[in-house]
Image (cartoon, rainbow, N blue to C red):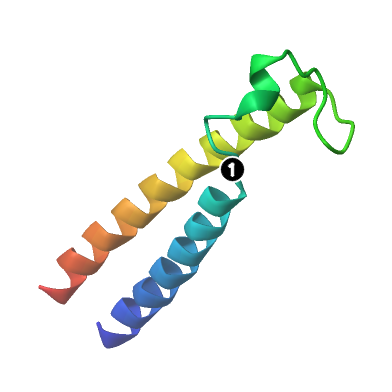
Amino acid sequence: MPVVTLVINILLLVAAVILIAVILMQDAKTAGLGSAFGNDTTALGRSRNQKASREAKLQKLTIILAIIVGVLALALLIFKA
């Protein structure tokens, strides 16, 4: 059992670090004054649709990683008992 808990601990740590990185890569929901004046492109020239697609992928990845972290935490609780 100690090997299983060690593996789960390592996986939990990796998933948590990736989750933090994905959350930090997301843009804030308030875009500031740029959205008030109808800015169609970002600073790098990407269109709004590409940016929205990237944000949608990051949000889905955040949900998936959060579920993985939750499942691993429950598995760790079960195997330590």
Question: Split into 4 quadrants, where in the image is the N terminus?
Answer: bottom left
Position above or below: 55 against 9: above
From the viewer's perspective, tell me whether residue 66 is left or right of residue 28. left
From the viewer's perspective, tell me whether residue 77 is left or right of residue 6. left
The residue lying at 39 percent from left, 67 percent from top is 12
Find numbered disc 1 in the image and state the secondary structure of the residue it sits on: loop
Q: Residue furthest left?
A: 81
Residue 34: percent from left, percent from top: 70, 25
Which residue is nearer to you in this view: 8 or 60? 60
The residue lying at 80 percent from left, 31 percent from top is 42
Residue 52: percent from left, percent from top: 68, 25
Question: Split into 4 quadrants, where in the image is the C terminus?
Answer: bottom left
Q: Residues within 10 Å of mark 1 (few under 14, many from 20)?
A: some
Q: Residue furthest right?
A: 45
The residue wearing badge 1 is 26
Position above or below: 41 against 14: above
The residue lying at 42 percent from left, 71 percent from top is 13
Q: Amino acid at mark 1?
A: Gln
Which residue is nearer to you in this view: 80 or 25? 25
Image-quadrant location for residue 5: bottom left
Q: Residue furthest bottom?
A: 2
Position above or below: 10 against 66: below
Residue 20: percent from left, percent from top: 49, 58
From the viewer's perspective, tell me whether residue 3 is left or right of residue 42. left
Residue 4: percent from left, percent from top: 33, 77
